[in-house]
Image: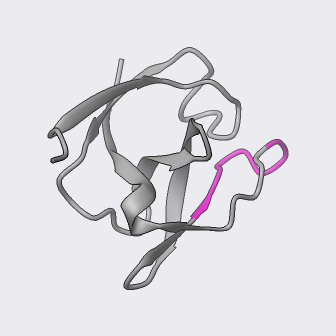
Amino acid sequence: MKVPFSRFVVCDRSMESAFLQGDHVLTFNWKKPQIGDVIVFEFGKIYKIKRAVKTSADLIFVAGDNRRVSSRVGPIEVSKIIGKVILKY
């Protein structure tokens, strides 16, 4: 069972200038993200933060706001998504 909220620390520069390295974020985990939402998802053994740019039934396509340094991760399975970022602190 998923918990309703999770906390993370941003560890890369792919979402600059909206989210900087070291920013803390809170996610809401009980709703499928929409286009434009910033999400945290599992990518191998780490967590990444990106913006949802396209959705389909089982996949979310994501991209970083800082395209110069953002790595391409391809589409994300909905099951790998932790949640939508609702707060930066």
Residue 53 falls left or right of residue 26: right
Q: Main secondary structure of the magenta part?
A: loop
Residue 65 belongs to magenta span: yes
Please state which of residues 8 and 51 is positioned toward the viewer in this rendering. 8
Residue at the right extreme, as displayed: 68
Residue 34 falls left or right of residue 10: left
In this picture, is 2 found above or below 36? above
In this picture, is 32 found above or below 20? below
Please state which of residues 24 and 16 is positioned toward the viewer in this rendering. 24
Q: Residue at x 48, y 68 (%)?
A: 77
Residue 48 screen position, x and y as percent: 57, 41
Residue 44 screen position, x and y as percent: 62, 46
Residue 49 screen position, x and y as percent: 54, 42
Residue at the bottom extreme, as displayed: 57
Q: How is the image coloured?
A: one colour
User: Which segment did they paint magenta?
Assistant: 62-69
Residue 29 screen position, x and y as percent: 24, 47
Q: Quadrant of the C terminus?
A: top left
Q: Residue at x 40, y 54 (%)?
A: 81
How many marks overall? Answer: 0
